[in-house]
Image (cartoon, coloured by chain):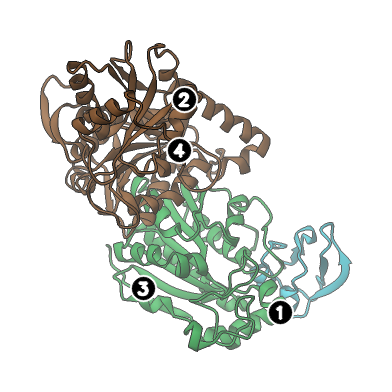
Amino acid sequence: MSAEYVLMKGNEAIAEAALRAGCRFYAGYPITPQSEILEYMSVNMEKRGGVFIQGENEIASMSMLFGAAACGARCMSSSSGPGFDLKQEEISYLSAAGIPAVIVNAMRYGLGDGEITAGQDSYWVSTRGGGHGDKRILVLAPASVQECADLTYEAFDLAEKYRNVVEILSDGAICQMIEKCYLPEPHEHDMDKFDWTLTGKPRDARKNKAYNLSYYMGYEAYDKYMREKIEAMFENEQRWESFMVEDAELVLVAYGISSRVCRSAVRQARKEGMKLGLIRPITVWPYPRKAFKDVPESVKGYVTVEMSITSQMGEDILLATEFKKPLYGCLTSKELPTVEGIIDRCRDILAGKIKPMEVL
Amino acid sequence: MPVYRKPESIINTAGYCGGCGHGVIQRLIAESIEELGLQDHVIGCVDIACSFWSQDAMNFEFIAGPHGRCASVATGIKKVRPDATVYVHAGDGCSYVIGLAETMYAAIRDVPITMIVVNNGIFGMTGGQLNLATTLVGDKTLSSKAGRKVETMGHPVDMLKNIANCDVAFAARGALYDARHIDETKRFIKKGFENQMEKKGFSIIEVLSPCPTNWKLSPVEAMAKIKNENEKVFPVGVYVDRGGKD
Amino acid sequence: MAKAKANTDLCKGCRLCVANCPKKAITALEVVNKKGYEIIEVNEELCIGCGICYKVCPDYVFTVE
């Protein structure tokens, strides 16, 4: 970690942290609100001896990444909303061949084209998506520019540790926010250090194939390998932050931009005598179920605060709490949640004016 | 007298149907690579259609899929492993239909890879459906049972003319219907690998190849069809030979 | 003189060699190999070792030496 801080946008922090992690291949296509990642890479990647490609589309960008990542290079791509949809095909192929890569999804609001402003309604496509087939994607959700840098830097290690795709799930607010940030130390990655990569081996050497691991491992061995890998990620990688949960009556649950508003709401509510707490998932897959294990008996229920009218995270909270406590919603879509809105909602909930939410 | 022996880079039987041209193309690739002394540093890129079987037959490292994306995948490989010989062996569905953008942009970027496209005018792996780019007008397929109609399906396209619009190192079309044309195709493919060795740009070699199974012809009849029909629409020869270095 | 030798285990019965041999030295048989394909036979007396069978064969049946 550098001793001096810099002021950066979330997008820039992600790009710079990737370069410092040894990422030497980036391919992507412009889409708001994440284009600064592409732009930053276009300026800085070649200076570090890496490859920057502006792809003809998302699919081609990801296919180029698929080839480069199969060779052992640390690779990243980024997108948002409709652009992220187009990346699903290759996430499935990367997953099938056990090829690590880091993909950024800066969520924007809405269906179809939606809007270029912040949203949190790509939770499902991130935590359940990644194209067809059985797999899991590790999904890290930064809530500050510092976390954009730290989580991106670490994402490459996690991707290689599990030979898995790792996603950075930011949003249009976090990725555009300018904050103080301490950048991690530059690291040089050795793309020849793995035994599974394509290097173009001589005639007498055992050859690697970048294709479905199941085809070469055998289906039974592959199933065991995948099951164990997913269980290991689930067990080892749950991350969260608990804030004033110890004596809370209601616990807010929020990630990314919403969690920042929630933190202010908890502080403000406590000034007004209402005991709120906050559980902030940092990984949204694996969902931090452990965070819900030791909440005190004082907790009367949970409130999911998300920019998603279908409460995409709600199901995960219900699973984490085993349906033992009621779940309430404080849902917005295009607008950020507000401190006042959250506090008013919680007051009504505690007064019994709001029914628990049925997640649909 | 010259000696003819299966190249040592081919280590397994070809997994194709009897009379399929893919096996010949594999041999031409292997011979070219070996004659140029490149076989110790090769990465092949196959599509998840018929060319897929090549990765089990050849003693090289391979990457397969996603369908249609071979030119992009090979671009990514070549960018991070510039000293490796990187080639694509894919069909006309991959290269000209679902992956047309990927192929054209590999040409536009002039990526120094060798791309071999098998033009057999049909979707072979999926059982014989129309190929929008290469099925001849009137040819019957499972998805054009009355024959390809221009009114609804358009004309087949000579994609090498489109590629010749880009500043590429080499573009040529060969055919497999007799030994003379097979020899010529070999010269084109070898030229494609030489260009890569000399760090020239993008080389694409399209090969008119039979799919007797899905054409519902005997292998010998299928070769006659290439000569009498397909070659009329898709003339063999060199489209671009830029020469020079870079 | 070089002669064509056939490893008919690899043959898939396509008959391209039969059609292309300039000396009609290759005969189509009704005998099948282990894979069930009808194989061929080279008449070494007629063979001139030209290599055409090697070139047209998609399955690497022929060696000419």
Seen in the picture, residue C37 relative to A235 is either above or below; the reply is below
Give the amino acid at mark 2: Ala
* The disc label shown at residue B163, or none: 3
**Chain ID for cyan:** C
**Dot 4: chain letter:** A
Query: Residue A338, relative to residue B143: is it above or below?
Result: above
Question: Disc 2 and disc 1: Cα gap in Å?
Answer: 61 Å
Front position among marks 2 and 3: 2
Q: Secondary structure at mark 1?
A: loop
Q: Which mark is residue A359?
A: 4
How crowded is the residue under tag 3: few (<14 C-alpha within 10 Å), some, or many (20+)?
Answer: many
Mark 3 vs 1, N-terminal side: 3
Mark 2 and mark 3 in contact? Answer it, CB < 8 Å: no
Q: CA distance from mark 3 to mark 1?
A: 31 Å
The residue under label 3 is which amino acid type? Ile
Q: Nearer the viewer, residue A187 or A29?
A: A29
Q: Is residue A203 left or right of residue C4?
A: left
**Residue B217, numbered circle:** 1
Q: Nearer the viewer, mark 4 or mark 3?
A: 4
In the rendered image, what is the letter of the chain coloured brown?
A: A
Q: Quadrant of residue A164?
A: top left
As drawn, which residue projects farthest toward the right? C31
B97, A236: nearer the viewer: A236
Q: Which chain does the numbered disc 2 sit on? A: A
Local SS, label 2: helix
| SS type, badge 4 | loop
Q: Circle 2 sits on which residue?
A: A320
Tell me the kind of residue under disc 4: Val
Name which quarter of the figure residue B48 lies in: bottom right
**Residue drawn 26% across the image and 42% down it:** A50
